[in-house]
Image (cartoon, coloured by chain):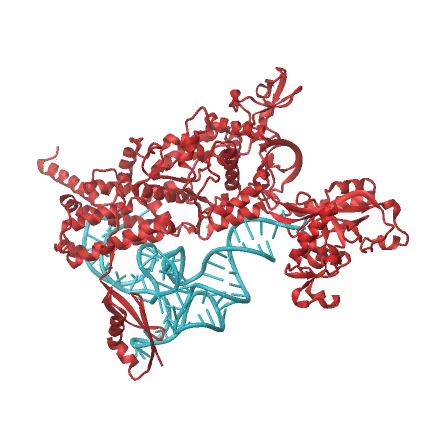
Chain colours: A red, B cyan
RNA sequence: GCGAAAGUGGCGGAAUUGGCAGACGCACCAGACUUAGGAUCUGGCGGGGCAACCCAUGGGGGUUCGAGUCCCCCCUUUCGCACCA
């Protein structure tokens, strides 16, 4: 049994331990305490009604795919939007800051194969795990607006939109060559093909297959999608450029070349025609065959220099020609084969140019000249018309091709500096010459025109004479949304033997995705192997019908999810128009630049469709976009194979959520790549500990006196308040748009360094309690967006009763922030020689005098002639001597 | 090939408008303290030199009283696009 003394000693030790704990920053305890409190307050992050007098602010981080684990990139992304959301709350805005799950997609099926877990269960488990991590990070989401795209409450509206688009002809079915990834066993959108390979399987060449597919007519909006990029001033220029290139508008002309009648070849040309290298002159007795080859060109001004036509190997006319010519057929097959091999080696761009002469000639409608028709492996079927006129003198690729096969080269434009007189021989070293600021020669009635002027006149001429017109071509293709996959939104369409394609009536939505599906690696949709899903009755005729078994591309889900957050539980409509009108456009959207094209162009398209359906009033979904940099480690992208993946859980367990979050903001400006260094997290954690200990030491004084400072202030108090207000000013200005949170956190560190250095003065009574209280209070507010757990704890410890989340952001006082004395560097001939102290409002003469009086300066300029003295008020003085 | 961004100590980075280069942090060095804790506190920390001073922001030129910042040429890295007619 213990003696009384022993018990007392133990009690003392225990209380000593408690005091020690108190004095030590222990994020695990603090964060657990506040997490429990926040979880118990569902209204904490709630939005106010639409009638709120506060300005609205919709801040959003891109929703994650529920892979099962947050990665460090998520921590960084969500630390940014969370800091911004918290700041806006403190600024008195009505903030919407939601989160959800992009929950359909292939990994769930792969996991099902591997672990024999149904995709739905796997996905929902992952969501639960990641939600736990988000709560642990202290992210300020109102989970009552959470959306999960794989649940029928959500995906039924994908189906509903699909029906609306179908009604309007924006969704259509066509047989088409599609990109097929054998590993995914599904179709890929053009946007998902990277270097001819699958975006998920970078080594896997994409195959072409012919399938009936559903498409969304994004090309209806191509021009508006392009034009409106100009409005998106709050988007990074980089993203706008990428989208502009993706849409790929080019202006040019389409010109019809007529194929010669092969049965009526003029006499005496047989030899010249053998190799297909010769350009043949215009002749009266040439006959057309009636067959036309349409060519797209952006340089119709060079058409007099065309010396051959080049067709894509898959061009329909080529099929016709090869049908009648076995030799040609073999040669074209060989071309295609080479192309396939090059693609498999992943080097489509560098493939050598090959061609085959078809034995046919076509007539240039401008001058009657006859051009050999070739098949070229560098011609793309799905761009323009799949055929080009080849102008070797004025196009790099055509030049290479012509040199290789000995085709003629005809110069028809000249640099302006060369005038009209230059002979062809002199020009040879210039070729291929492509400058548009040039003049036409050898071009009939168009000679001596400038290129741009000629382009317009020649297109108009072609139109007048019925063999062409000015046109615009886009690189953007319609969006193929069919996927032969199970884990996605069923496409709400039926096939009836009598009625053909029949949409599922709106009243029958949602078309539920069955749960009990066997996932296999066989090609085609697993749904096709479920008779109970496939077989149904036709709503039109009551006869037998089959359901569409393809599901939608998951990019459909993310194209409009942010609208759903505003009205997440609406079961009558995807959302209420008025609610969306209040919250949209999104004030600030934050995510990775990898979504610059796919997600961000699809969601712009979806917004425009919804606007035309009368559902929303905004033309664009996102006012300001911010793309944060990647998190790398040791200079390399984090990946499992490199073994350099950082687990957020470990980081949080060791240093706390505040330190992990704050480090992710401190280590680099948010738009740049961040090199993750664990020692850096430890450093931030140490800093938070310093803040904590300082606050604990002086919390009682802060509690005791929260009144006015009183005057006059001691120099020590003035210096501290000056630093405080300079810090407030810096951070406030930074939140307005510069967003260099790394320097904001550095500024807070400077403030804290100054505070700890001032401790002797504080302890000597030179800083009144009211000033200490003011500083502690403001410091806590400044920390709140970056380290919310610690800030909430300090707020309570210094006796504040209000909810920190909505406490007003501190205002900076310009008078307090102003320096009274400033240091002015003094240069002689641009070299720093001294620093003088003057009052902040000193005029030029005073500064000049002070500088000249400085001992060092006086010594250095003694006996020299002063040529000039430059005084930059409040900045610098430079004395120029000879 | 085309387009964009970037290049600053041993490392991450700062310098917002042409005005003290290296804030803040990491690592490291020296010291103090100790309840030995991923402690804490103090000081140092671009290079050369005893110093005065000199050199230094990828390289070379230029503009300017003054350049990391602006202009020209070149090099390197990263990202995007890539046979788009």
In the rendered image, which quarter contains the C terminus of chain A? bottom left
Q: Is residue A263 above or below residue A482?
A: below
Location of residue A755 (image quadrant): bottom left
Left or right relative to A767: residue A394: right
Q: Residue at x 37, y 34 (%)?
A: A132
Q: Is residue A225 above or below residue A873?
A: above
- The percent coordinates of residue A859 (x first, y second) are 27, 80
Q: Is residue A491 above or below residue A331?
A: above
Q: Residue furthest bottom?
A: A863
Q: Nearer the viewer, residue A706 or A422?
A: A422
Q: Nearer the viewer, residue A814 or A4?
A: A814
Q: Residue furthest front?
A: A464
Count of numbered circles in the view:
0
Left or right relative to A712: residue B72: right
- The percent coordinates of residue A835 (x first, y second) are 27, 70
Mark yes or no: residue A657 visible. Answer: no
- The percent coordinates of residue A837 (x first, y second) are 24, 68
Q: Residue furthest left?
A: A4
Mark yes or no: residue A268 visible. Answer: yes
- The percent coordinates of residue A556 (x first, y second) are 52, 34
Left or right relative to A814: residue A450: right
In the rendered image, which quarter contains the N terminus of chain A? top left
Q: Residue furthest top?
A: A542
Q: Nearer the viewer, residue A432 or A24?
A: A432
Q: Residue at x 59, y 18 (%)?
A: A539
């Amino acid at each position: 049994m213990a003696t009384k003394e022993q018990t007392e000693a133990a009690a003392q030790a225990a209380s000593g331990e408690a005091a020690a704990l108190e004095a030590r920053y222990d994020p695990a305890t603090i964060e657990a305490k506040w997490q429990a409190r926040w979880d118990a307050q569902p209204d904490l992050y709630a939005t106010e009604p639409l009638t709120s007098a506060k300005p609205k602010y919709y801040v959003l981080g891109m929703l994650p795919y529920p892979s099962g684990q947050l990665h460090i990139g998520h921590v960084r992304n969500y630390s940014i939007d969370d800091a911004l959301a918290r700041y806006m709350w403190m600024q008195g805005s009505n903030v919407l800051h939601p989160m959800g799950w992009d929950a359909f997609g292939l990994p769930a099926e792969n996991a099902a194969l591997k672990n024999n877990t149904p995709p739905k269960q796997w996905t929902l488990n992952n969501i639960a795990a990641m939600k736990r991590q988000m709560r642990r990070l202290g992210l300020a989401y109102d989970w009552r607006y959470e959306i999960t795209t794989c649940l029928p409450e959500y995906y039924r509206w994908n189906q509903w939109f699909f029906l609306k688009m179908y009604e309007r002809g924006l969704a259509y079915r066509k047989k088409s060559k599609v990109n097929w990834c054998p590993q995914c066993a599904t179709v890929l959108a053009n946007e998902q093909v990277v270097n001819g390979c699958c975006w998920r399987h970078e080594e896997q060449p994409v195959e072409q297959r012919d399938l009936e597919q559903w498409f969304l007519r994004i090309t209806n909006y191509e021009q508006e999608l392009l034009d409106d990029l100009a409005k998106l001033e709050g988007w990074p220029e980089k993203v706008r450029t990428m989208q502009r290139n993706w849409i790929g508008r080019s202006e040019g002309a389409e010109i019809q070349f007529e194929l010669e009648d092969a049965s009526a070849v003029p006499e005496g040309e047989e030899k010249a025609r053998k190799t297909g290298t010769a350009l043949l002159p215009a002749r009266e007795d040439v006959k057309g065959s009636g067959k036309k080859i349409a060519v797209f060109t952006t340089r119709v001004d060079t058409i007099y220099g065309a010396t051959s036509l080049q067709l894509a190997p898959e061009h329909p006319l080529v099929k016709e020609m090869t049908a009648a010519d076995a030799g040609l057929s073999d040669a074209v097959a060989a071309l295609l084969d080479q192309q396939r091999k090059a693609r498999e080696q992943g080097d489509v761009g560098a493939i050598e140019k090959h061609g085959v002469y078809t034995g046919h000639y076509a007539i240039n409608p401008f001058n009657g000249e006859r051009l050999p028709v070739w098949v070229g492996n560098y011609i793309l079927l799905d761009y323009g018309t799949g055929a080009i006129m080849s102008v070797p003198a004025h196009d790099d690729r055509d030049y290479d091709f012509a040199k290789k096969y000995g085709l003629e080269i005809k110069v028809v434009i000249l640099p302006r500096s060369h005038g009209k007189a230059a002979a062809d021989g002199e020009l040879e070293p210039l070729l291929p010459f492509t400058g548009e600021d040039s003049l036409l020669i050898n071009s009939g009635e168009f000679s001596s025109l400038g290129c741009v002027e000629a382009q317009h006149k020649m297109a108009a001429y072609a139109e007048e004479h019925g063999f062409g017109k000015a046109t615009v071509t886009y690189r953007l293709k319609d969006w193929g949304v069919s996927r032969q996959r199970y884990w996605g939104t069923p496409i709400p369409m039926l096939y009836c033997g009598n009625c053909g394609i029949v949409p599922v009536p709106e009243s029958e939505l949602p078309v539920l995705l069955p749960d009990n599906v066997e996932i296999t690696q066989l090609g085609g949709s697993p749904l096709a192997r479920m008779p109970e899903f496939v077989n149904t009755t036709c709503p039109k005729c009551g006869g037998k019908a089959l359901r569409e078994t393809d599901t939608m591309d998951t990019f459909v889900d993310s194209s409009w999810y942010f609208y759903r957050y505003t009205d997440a539980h609406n079961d009558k409509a995807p959302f209420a128009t008025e609610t969306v009108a209040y919250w949209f456009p999104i004030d600030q959207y934050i995510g990775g630049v990898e979504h610059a094209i796919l997600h961000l162009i699809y969601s712009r398209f979806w917004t425009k469709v919804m606007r035309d359906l009368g559902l929303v009033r905004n033309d664009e979904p996102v006012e300001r976009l911010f793309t944060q940099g990647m998190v790398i480690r040791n200079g390399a992208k984090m990946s499992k194979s490199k073994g350099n993946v950082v687990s957020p859980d470990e980081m949080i367990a060791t240093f706390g959520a505040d330190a992990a979050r704050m480090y992710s903001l401190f280590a680099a400006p948010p738009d740049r790549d961040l090199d993750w260094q664990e020692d850096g997290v430890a450093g931030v954690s140490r800093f938070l500990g310093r803040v904590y200990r300082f606050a604990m030491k002086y919390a009682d004084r802060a509690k005791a006196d929260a009144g006015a400072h009183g005057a006059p202030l001691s120099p020590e108090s003035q210096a501290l308040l000056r630093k405080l207000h300079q810090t407030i000013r810096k951070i406030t200005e930074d939140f307005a748009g510069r967003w260099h949170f790394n320097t904001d956190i550095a500024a807070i560190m400077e403030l804290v360094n100054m505070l700890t250095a001032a401790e002797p003065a504080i302890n000597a009574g030179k800083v009144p309690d009211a000033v200490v209280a003011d500083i502690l209070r403001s410091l806590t507010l400044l920390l709140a967006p970056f380290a919310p757990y610690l800030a909430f704890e300090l707020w309570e410890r210094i006796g504040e009763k209000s909810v920190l989340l909505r406490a007003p952001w501190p205002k900076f006082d310009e008078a307090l922030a102003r320096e009274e004395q400033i240091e002015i560097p003094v240069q002689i001939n641009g070299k720093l020689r001294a620093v003088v102290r003057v009052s902040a409002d000193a005029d030029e003469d005073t500064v000049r005098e002070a500088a000249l009086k400085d001992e060092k300066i006086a010594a250095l300029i003694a006996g020299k002639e002063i040529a000039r003295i430059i005084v930059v008020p409040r900045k610098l003085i430079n004395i120029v001597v000879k």
